[in-house]
Amino acid sequence: MKIGSMSRRALACALITLAAAPAVALAQDQKPIEWVVGYAAGGGSDTVARTIAEEMGKSLKRTIIVSNKPGAATNIAADYVAKSKDYGNIMFTADFATLAANPALFAKLPYDAEKDFVPVGMLARFPLLLVVHPSNPANNLKEFIAWVKANPNGANFASAGAGSPQHLAAELFKERTGLALQHVAYRGGAPAVIDLVGGQIPFALMDSATVQQYVVSGKLKALGVASKERLKNFPDVPTLSEQGLSGFDASAWQGLVVPKGTPPETVAALNKTLQAALASTPVKARLETLSLEALHGTPQQMTSYVHAERERWGALIRKNQIRLD
């Protein structure tokens, strides 16, 4: 009887050990986890990382420190993480630029977007809104197209920078509408919006996190949503697809990755913790205030999504001969 009892006890302990394996993999080194963000502190990317990191840190019982390494369209941060061997202690917000656009925008990168990173899971989608100055007579897509066509020189549009999601979405918009549109690149969404609000530039396809407060206050007018569905915070603003641009879908997005070589059990543990964080009340509430959409899923689902986006936007970049080097 004692032998049987001990066997059952040993088996139970073994099962508990196996179940806790991912957590153990992350707890082997109790130094803080570095979460690298390729943008300056205070922006939307930084806010998303800090919000989710706080919840993940609680679950992992480890401190997660957000490290901002802005510059070169996220290439500085991406290179830093790609070369890191600090497995289990470093992760990176890899976004639309890092994984989808930069491989086509640059002839040579210091990292391989497909081979140097291991997906953990998607983070969030930043929907884009077609916004104009309130003085613009257009109140919908049809009226906006008529307004542009009535101007001999077409219209200028602002973006957060050359090759940014806002820029490429507007290039797709230009292609689909056939309008005469000229790009004006800014160093970030904030300065672009300042000129939009000031009336120095007529319109933009800008992310919801950047323009939401200005639309709510009436300083900008939203004519359409570039996503497949209307936004919860702007239920009365129809999608561009509803207004005639069938299937139009463009957005900025972010995912969480770790450097190649990170143990599979560590990736699994991080994904499990990430999914819990995205489903938590504080994260959901914070993302909702910014009109951002949490993107749940597995590493495999992230791989498929990123591949499709890289193919799609790479084709647009090459067709329009857009280069950043």
Image (cartoon, rainbow, N blue to C red):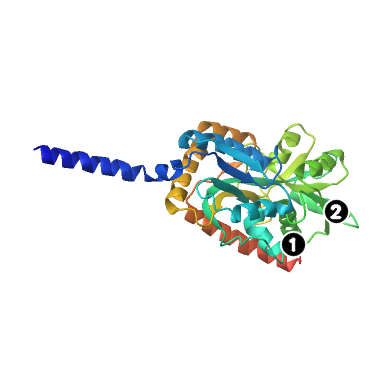
Q: Depth check: give the residue in front, 219 or 67.
A: 67
Residue at (48, 45) in percent of width and height: 270
Tell me the crowding category of disc 1: few under 14, some 14 to 19, or many 20 or more residues within 10 angstroms, Cα based.
Answer: some
Rounded to the nearest whole Å, what is the CA distance between mark 1 and mark 2? 14 Å
Q: Name the kind of residue labelled 2 in the image.
A: Ala
Mark 1: which secondary structure?
helix
Q: Quadrant of the N terminus?
A: top left
Q: Looking at numbered disc 1 in the image, what kind of residue is underneath it?
A: Glu
- The residue indicated by pointer 1 is 175
Residue 218, how many percent across, how many down?
78, 33
Lateral position of residue 53 relative to residue 136, left or right = left
Quarter of the image where the C terminus is located: bottom right
The residue carrying mark 2 is 155
Pinpoint residue 5: horizontal percent, then vertical percent. Answer: 14, 38
- Badge 2 crowding class, 10 Å Cα cut-off, few under 14, some 14 to 19, many 20 or more, is some
User: Is 73 displayed left or right of 301 in the figure?
Assistant: right
Residue 249 visible in image: no
* Residue at image location 85% in from the left, 42% down from the top: 195
Mark 1 or mark 2: name the one nearer the start of the chain.
2
